[in-house]
């Protein structure tokens, strides 16, 4: 019998959490799935853990590849996925027992999304979506509400047929926003969307990596331009579309946050290019709505969430604008 779900787990040096991740998948109440473990050149015990569980359950397929990043690992898994739907799970996350059952019982759609529980140290927060079923442009109202929850590939299931028919893949040269680009491209090629109220995905935030990662602001700019291009295609080149304006507002805020972090490491000529891009999208954003959108910054570490975020970002944008005019 063909599997209904193909679960793809990219793995890199995940020995600390990997067993819990795999165990949470194997005890699902809905059992018609295949589990693809993509070991992306791990140097710890992840390979051994994968092989051990492969021997215990015939639904598990293990692939060992050279380290080329999480996007390549996910794309590799897509090639070998045989299920009707594809799901992605991060190797340091877990799912509750009914996670797949929730998807199985949901109305049939090209994409089904459920909420999640965000875990950061001893603090957790539940993201609960309003149930809906929409097609075509009707989906835009729902997408506006869930905002940056689209910035990740997990806790969603995608039609395998649509992914393979349109050769949809994660952009491997992006280190930021590659997930959002994939999701937007999928939405552009698909027709129906279902959101459900359950939240059986447990997403772990690991702050230990956040302050160590440096992104070149010009690279971030290139990635944000790719996001805008994908978003514009989804919105059928209508920049006045509410979805375009809402998501542009969210991305403007997040992009500005990164620019602030690495501002003093940015060359003057690059600052001008960054300012030019921000200026080009500025007319389509509404920063006053950002505080009211509960999804805008939930994936950022708690310590970076500013209550007065709209005023903060406006002020920083003004300073960037001022410096570029000198």
Image (spheres, rainbow, N blue to C red):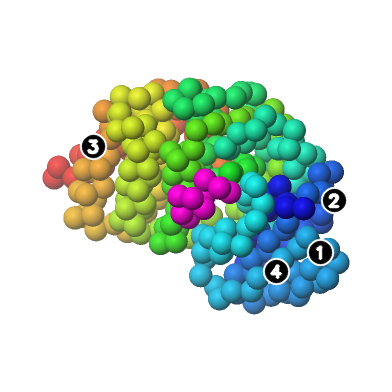
Q: How dense is the environment of label 4, judged by Cα within 10 Å: few (below 14), some, or many (20 and up)?
A: some
Disc 1 target residue: 58
Q: Residue at x 61, y 62 (%)?
A: 80
Q: Residue at x 81, y 64 (%)?
A: 58
Q: Does the segment drawn in magenta span residue 62?
A: no
Helix, strand or loop under label 4? strand
Label 4 with label 3: CB-CB less than 8 Å = no
Q: Residue at x 78, y 60 (%)?
A: 59
Disc 4 target residue: 62
- Outermost left residue: 326
Helix, strand or loop under label 1? loop
- Whether residue 254 appears in this view of the structure is yes
Which one is in front, 38 or 61? 61
- The magenta stretch spans which residues? 160-170
Of mark 3 and mark 1, the one earlier in the sequence is 1
Tag on residue 27? Answer: 2
Of mark 4 and mark 2, the one earlier in the sequence is 2
Q: Disc 3 versus disc 1: distance between alpha carbons?
A: 53 Å
Mark 1 vs mark 4: give the one in front: 1
Which one is in front, 67 or 299? 67
> Residue 192: percent from the left, percent from the top?
54, 31
How many dots with numbers?
4
Disc 3 target residue: 280
Q: Disc 1 versus disc 4: distance between alpha carbons?
A: 11 Å
Of mark 3 and mark 2, the one earlier in the sequence is 2
Q: How dense is the environment of label 1, judged by Cα within 10 Å: few (below 14), some, or many (20 and up)?
A: few
Q: How dense is the environment of label 2, judged by Cα within 10 Å: few (below 14), some, or many (20 and up)?
A: few
Quadrant of image for the C terminus: top left
**Does residue 99 sit above or below 244 in this rendering?**
below
């Amino acid at each position: 019998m063909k599997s209904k779900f193909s679960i793809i787990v990219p793995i890199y040096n995940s020995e600390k959490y990997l067993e819990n991740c795999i165990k949470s998948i194997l005890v699902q109440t809905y059992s018609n799935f295949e589990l693809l473990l993509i070991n992306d050149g791990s140097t710890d015990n992840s390979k051994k853990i994968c092989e051990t569980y492969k021997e215990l359950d015939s639904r598990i397929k293990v692939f060992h590849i050279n380290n080329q990043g999480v996007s390549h690992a996910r794309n590799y898994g897509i090639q070998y996925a045989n299920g009707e739907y594809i799901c992605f799970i991060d190797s340091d996350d877990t799912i509750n027992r009914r996670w797949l059952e929730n998807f199985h019982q949901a109305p049939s759609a090209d994409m089904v999304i459920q909420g999640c529980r965000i875990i950061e140290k001893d603090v957790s927060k539940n993201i609960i979506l309003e149930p809906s079923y929409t097609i075509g442009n009707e989906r835009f109202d729902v997408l506006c509400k869930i905002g940056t929850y689209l910035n990740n590939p997990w806790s969603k299931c995608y039609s395998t047929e649509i992914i393979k028919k349109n050769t949809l893949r994660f952009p491997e040269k992006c280190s930021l926003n590659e997930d959002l680009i994939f999701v937007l491209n999928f939405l552009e090629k698909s027709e129906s969307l279902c959101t459900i109220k359950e939240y059986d995905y447990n997403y772990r935030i690991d702050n230990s990596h956040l302050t160590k990662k440096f992104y070149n602001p010009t690279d971030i700019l290139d990635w944000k331009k790719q996001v805008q291009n994908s978003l514009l295609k989804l919105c059928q080149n209508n920049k006045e579309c509410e979805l375009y304006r809402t998501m542009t507002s969210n991305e403007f805020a997040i992009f500005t946050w990164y620019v602030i972090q690495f501002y003093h490491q940015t060359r003057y000529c690059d600052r001008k290019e960054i300012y030019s891009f921000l200026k080009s999208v500025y007319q389509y954003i509404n920063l006053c709505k950002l505080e009211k959108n509960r999804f805008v910054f939930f994936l950022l570490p708690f310590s970076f969430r500013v209550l007065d975020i709209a005023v903060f970002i406006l002020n920083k944008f003004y300073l960037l604008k001022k410096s570029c005019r000198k």
